Amino acid sequence: MWNHARVASQNYIRNRSVGIYLTVSPQETYSGSAICLEINGRLFVATAAHNFDGVENGATFVAFSANRSSDTPLEIISSNLARNRSADGPDLAWLEVAVASARASDLEGVSLDSVNSRPVIHPMDGYVATGFPVHLRREERVRPNHANFVVPLLIYFTAAARIDDSAIVLDYHREGLGPQGPGLIAEPHGMSGGAVWHVPTKQGQDGIWNPGRIRLIGVTTRYVRAHNELHGLAMIEWLRLLAGDVPELAESINPLIIE
């Protein structure tokens, strides 16, 4: 059943995933990852704040659908990037994407019904981290003096996870599902900001496993190489941030963040 869950999840996840490409200088560039949510008919991207380090000093970035590349960026209409992040605050950020821009890039949003803001461990189920590892990035020259960057989406499945309050930890032993299928995969540099998912492996009552059963539970914030671990924060932390910054969304978000 695990294989069926894995295969069925791929397109669902891809259609809601976003890549970030940050340019500090022509010689200094970085990749990051993100996930798109739909709230009250608007589309918001959840990601890690450190993906935008340097923007305050003139660095530029583009965000693009997993179904596109950096040459077809999404239109960002608002964000919290202008706000100063406190040193002890969560490493999280949000961007609002124009709906028409998302549609043109085949990007959809995860509904709040598919978000588990307070996840707990289910030992028999699977957990998935998704993102755009920088080692898989390739450059294409689409016109003079313009580079188009393509970064394949990596979907990493594991049954080994820990959850402690808002902290999520996934084992990352580099055996996973890469662009060429199962096998040894790249180190996850660039996956910060990508989604963490809970994937139930049991069939539904109709005997069919469908991707609508997976739940978005968190955002990856860092890779701890010494322990082969991906660390992330539960979605409740990002939802609290967004509700505070965009108060007109609070009525929809509060049921997920207020005990």
Image (spheres, grey):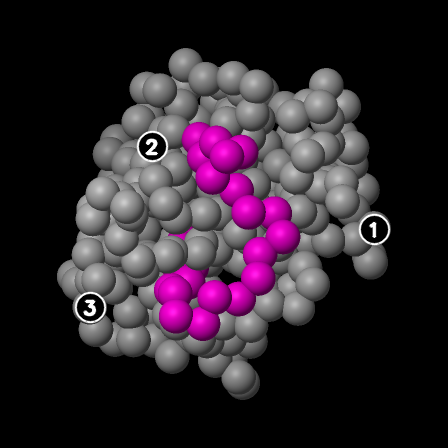
Residue 92, given in percent of the width and then of the height, sits at 66, 48
Q: In the displayed image of the protein, which residue is found farthest to the left?
A: 180
Q: SS for tag 3? A: strand
Q: Name the residue located 45 percent from the left edge and 47 percent from the top edge.
A: 215
Give how far apart the Cα atoms at labels 1 and 2 are: 33 Å
Residue 145, given in percent of the width and then of the height, sits at 34, 35
Number of the front mark, 2 or 3: 3
- The type of residue carrying mark 1 is Ser
User: Is residue 114 in the magenta section?
Assistant: yes
Q: In the displayed image of the protein, which residue is found farthest to the front?
A: 205
Q: Name the residue located 22 percent from the left edge and 43 percent from the top edge.
A: 206
Q: SS for tag 2? A: loop
Above or below 50: residue 15: above
Label whose residue precedes the other's in the sequence (3 or 1): 1
Above or below 198: residue 55: above
According to the picture, the residue beneath numbered tag 3 turns out to be 182
Crowd tier of the residue under label 3, counting other residues whose Cα lies within 10 Å: few below 14, some 14–19, many 20 or above: few
* Camera-nearest residue between 212 and 91: 212
- The type of residue carrying mark 3 is Pro
Residue 114, given in percent of the width and then of the height, sits at 47, 39
According to the picture, the residue beneath numbered tag 2 turns out to be 71
Above or below 188: residue 179: above
Horizontal arrangement in the rendering, residue 238 relative to residue 8 (left or right): right
Q: SS for tag 1? A: loop
According to the picture, the residue beneath numbered tag 1 turns out to be 86
Quadrant the C terminus occupies: top right
Quadrant the N terminus occupies: bottom left
Give how far apart the Cα atoms at labels 3 and 1 are: 40 Å
Quadrant in the rendering for residue 149: top left
Find the magenta span and give its range. Answer: 109-131
